[in-house]
Image (cartoon, rainbow, N blue to C red):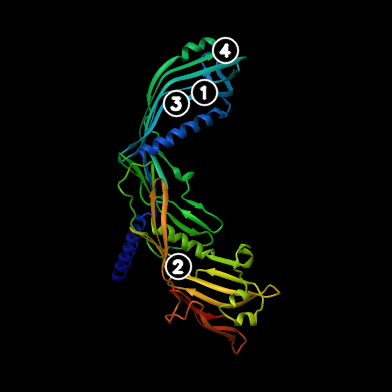
Amino acid sequence: MGAQSLAVAWGALALCLAFTRAANPGFVVRITQAGLDYAHQHGITVLEKELAQLKLPDISGDFRVWHVGKVQYEISRLSLRSFHLPYSRISLVPGVGLQVSISHAFAELDGNWRVKLRDHGSFDLRVESIYIKIQLGLGSDALGKPTIDTSSCSTRISSIRVHFSGKFGYVTALWECGCRAPVPGLGYWNTSLWFTVTAKIDAMAGIDYSLVAPPAATAQSLDVDLKGEFFSLAHRSAIPFPPLALALPPDHDRMVYFGASSYFFNTASVAYHAAGALVLDITNSMIPKDVEFHLNTSTFSAFVPQLEELYPHMEMKVRLSAPSAPFLTIRPDGLSLRPVVDIQTYAILPNSTLAPLFLLSLVSCNVSAVIDVKSGHIVGSLKVGRYGGEQPGGLVGSRGRGEVGRSQNGDLVWRGWVGAGGSRFHVQPMGG
């Protein structure tokens, strides 16, 4: 019993930790009433254009007529001539979600009809003064997919007018009516059938934007907390660090607000590092021709004279790589990044093979940035601090000092330090 109780306790603790970690989003979105009005304005314009090009399917079936029996009918060549929404609005409902209101809407539809009683003709349908009010309760399911529940719905149609051509034209008067019909509720909309919470960014990484909590509606805005986690497409593994708390300031003057925590950026760093994307190769052909610097052993012989002796007049290749995923820290006073960068150099031999020269490791580089918004523009400043090598040591000088030679097994070896100003690089021997 003791072992079982301990297992249950550990399981409960793990479950609590999982829920605690999932409570913090990596990315948040806030849309205010002004943002809803803007999106609604452009959405109505797009909707009316799409409805003007809508192709309606034909309708066929049968019905029973007293003393006649079953009558088959067919309605074809349906065309939506016009559809207008003079007034409609999407508004916020605190604690619920959204409310969609439509009034004074009307639509005109025409088409052809045919019945088995050897009669046919055309018809015109006009629906006037349509009133609709729907409250949409917004939530999320266990998978983080959004859910929509119609907490209330009411509709009213003031007038429906239908005109038939043909022998049954007298039916027109029967279709002129006004009606008020409250809808008891359209129920729960299961978005899991069509809504996905992951997307492919490129060939290497994807992003998980599932909800970590139901959308929160207030009188001023709708806040949506998203997971905001990048992952490798080749192999998705658990993120070894939890998301930190993230909340937007109490501001509602703009239409839309976005917020991203360090979790959002650092999961992208982990994903792309796992995919091998944080590697950059630089060759002499990539350097602009109007630049006097050339990536070859003749240029680098100013630092290491032995290079010109061992590999005379050969182009070089520099590979920048990150041995570990760089991590970004977000603070109130700005951003801070401490990447570890390996700079590996090669000599390109006449047969196009690469001869390793030396490896420089930058292990204490600190890059900080301050970002602000002024006059509608994003501005900022970047500061690169001191950076140094893997091991402590004295500063040799701006030109560097070292010795290059062959080891007992024929490998090229450079022992020493290369520095400039406040920088220090530890040089590791590479095999030749």
- Disc 4 to disc 1, how far (Cα)? 20 Å
Question: For the residues carrying marks 3 and 4, which lies nearer the camera in this image?
Answer: 3
Question: For the residues carrying marks 2 and 3, which lies nearer the camera in this image?
Answer: 2
User: Residue 82 got which mark?
Assistant: 1
Tell me if residue 38 comes above or below residue 204 in the rendering: above
Q: Which residue is mark 3?
A: 85
Q: Which residue is mark 2?
A: 339
Residue 3, how many percent across, how many down?
Answer: 31, 70
User: Residue 391 got which mark?
Assistant: none
Q: Earlier in the sequence, mark 4 or mark 1?
A: 1
Tell me if residue 156 comes above or below residue 119 in the rendering: below
Q: Quadrant of residue 227?
A: bottom left
Q: Residue at x 53, y 30 (%)?
A: 49
- Tell me the SS state at disc 2: loop
Q: Which residue is mark 4?
A: 165
Q: Earlier in the sequence, mark 4 or mark 2?
A: 4
